[in-house]
Amino acid sequence: MASYASRRRNSTIVMGLCLAATGIGVVWLFLILFSLLVNGIPGLTLAVFTEMTPPPGEHGGGLLNAIFGSVLMTVLGVGIGAPIGILAGTYLAEYGRHSKLTPVIRFINDILLSAPSIIIGLFVYGAVVVPMRSFSAVAGSIALAVIVIPVVVRTTEDMLLLVPNTLREAASALGLPRSFVIRRVAYRAARAGLITGVLLAVARVGGETAPLLFTVLSNQFWSANLLKPMANLPVTINNFINNPDANWKQLAWTGALLITVAVLSLNITARIFGASKDGR
Amino acid sequence: MTTISDTTKHLDMAASSDRARVLKSLALSDKVFAFATRAAAYAVLLLLAGIILSLIAGAWPAMKAFGFEFLITRRWAPQLEPEPVLGALAPIYGTLVSSFIAMLIAVPFGLGIAIFLTELCPHAIRRPIRLAIELLAGIPSIIYGMWGFFVLGPFLANHIEPSIVAAVANIPVLNSIFSGEMVSNLSLFNASLILAIMILPFITAIAVDVFSTVPPVLKEAAYGIGCTTWEVVNNVVLPFTRVGVVGGVMLALGRALGETMAVTFIIGNSFKISGSIFAPGTTISAAIASEFAESEGLHQSALILLGLLLFVLTFIVLASARFMLMRLEKRAGA
C-alpha cells in the first residue's frame, strides 16, 4: 500500500481539482450576466417599454408589443397549465395514492418534464396550428401550457406528500368530505410549496423560444388578437439578433437582459418561498 | 307541553332537511372534485399519446417516401428537383457527437463540484455556490445561444482552438479530429461546450442529492480507519451512489440531446458530416428550429420525422434514467 504521505498528496490533488471545478462552474453565471449587462444596459431607455418594435433601418422604437405578448402568453399558458397540473398532482398524491396507474402517470409526467421543448412546438403545430390554419397566440399559449403541466404536477405531488397524514385524519374525523379535506387542509398546509411550483413554471416558460417559433411566429406590430400571430420577446430577440441592423441588435440585447433578469428573479423568489417553508 | 314538543319536532325536521340538502351538495362537489383530479391525471397520459400520434401523423409522408433509407442518407437537399433528397444521418451524427462531447466535459465538472459541495465546502458558502450553479439552469436557452454566438464562440475560435490545432498537428488521429481547416465561430465543439455549461447544474444537483443519501456512519467508519477524503469519496460515496449518479447523468444527456435554441445559434447549421469537431454541423433540434417555419410538403414532413426520432431517442434515455433513479429511491426507502 502506498505511503500515507502519498495518499494524502493524492487526496489533496483531487480535492484541489474539485475546488477548481467549482470555481470554473460558478464563473459562467457571472460571465453571462456581465455580457448581458454590458450589451443590454446601453439600450435600456424608457422607449423600450413604451414604443413598438421598429421596422428595419429605423432609429428608436422599443419592445412594448413584444413584452405585452410575452406576458399575455405566459399568463395564459400558466393559467391553462397550472390548474390542470395542480389537479393531476392532487390525484397522484391523494385519490390515486394506491392506484396501479399512479406510478405510470408519474413516470410519463417525468418524461414530459424533460422532453425537448421543440417537440412540444411540433406537437402544437400539428394539433392546433394546422387545424386552425393560422399561427396564433392561442397556439403559443397552449404550447407553454403543455410545458407548465408536468412542472406543476411534480411539485404539487411532492408538496402534498409532505403534508402529514394526521392532519387529513383529524379533518376526516370531523366529518369533512374528502374534497374538503384536500382543499381546506392539505392545500393550505402545502400552500407555499404549491406557489413555488407555479413560480418555477412561470420561470421555466418565460424564456422559452423553441416552442413559440412555429406556433405564434411573431408580429412586427401591436396585436391583442389571440387568433393571430403575436409579438413576443424570445422570438423577437431571435429575429433581431442575427440582423445587421444595429438598432435591432441593440433591442435584442436589451430584451435578453430583461428576460434573464425577470426569469432569474422569479427563480430566486421561488427558492426563498420554498426555503421559508422549510425553515418553519 | 305538546305544542313545544311539536315545535321542536318541526324544527328538527327542517334542520334535518337542511342537513340533507347540505350533505347532498357536499357529496356532489366531492364527486366533481374527485372527477376533475382524475381527469387531469389522465390528461397527462393523453398528452403523451397526443404528442406521439401527432408526430407520427406528421411524419407519415416522409416515412413512406424515404423509408429506412432516411436514417442512413447523408444528403439533405430539400430544394432538389423533381424530388427532394432528405437524409437524417448528418443531424443524428451532430446530435450524438455534440451531446457526447458535452457529457465528457460536464460529467467530471459536475461530479467534482458535487464532491466539493458535500465533502469540503464550509457550510456558510455552500448555499450561495449551489445557487450560482443552479441558476445556470434558469437562464433561457436563447440567452446561451446569443452569448455563445457573440462572446464564447469568437473567443474560442481566436484564442483557444488555433493553439489546440497547432499542438496536435503532427499526431495522426487527433489532427483530423481537431482539424484546423475551418476553425470558425460556429462549430460542433463550441455547441458542445455551451451544452456542457447548460447541463452542468442538472448533474451537480442530482449528484449532491444522491451523495447526501450516503449514511454518515459509513463515511465516518471509513474516516475512522484512516481514509483520506478522496479515498472516502472513491471507495464509499461513489460505489454507494453509482446508480443514482448514472441516472442523473442520463437525465442530463436527455436534456443535451433535445436542447434547441443555444445549439441553433452556434453550431452553424451545416448538413455535412465532418471528421473535425471544429467544423460546423447541425443537430436534429437545430435543423427543425432553423428550417421548419419556411418548410412545406415533404420537407416539413421530414423535419417532423426528425422530431419523432429525437423524441424516441430522448424517451429511451430519460426512461432509463428514471428507472435507475427509481431503483435508488426504492433502496433508500427499504
Image: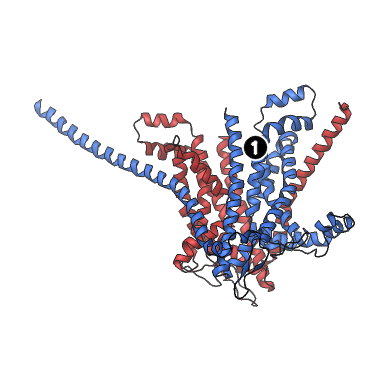
Chain colours: A red, B blue
In screen coordinates, is B47 left or right of A24? left
Residue B186: image x %, image y %? 74, 63
**Horizontal side, residue B123 vs residue B79: left or right:** right
What is the residue that sits farthest to the right in this orientation? Answer: B170
Q: Name the residue under label 1.
A: B244
* Residue type, label 1: Gly
Residue B142 makes an appearance in the image? no
In the rendered structure, the residue with mark 1 lies on which chain? B
Q: Residue at x 71, y 56 (%)?
A: A32
List x then y, in percent, for residue A104: 49, 41
Mark 1, secondary structure of its residue? helix
Identify which residue, A280 or B54, lies in the foreground: B54
Against B323, is B157 above or below?
Answer: below
Image quadrant in which you'd find residue B269: bottom right
- The quadrant in which the N terminus of chain A is found is top right
- In depth, the one of B239 and B15 nearer the eye is B239
Q: Position of residue B80 (x, y in %)?
A: 63, 73
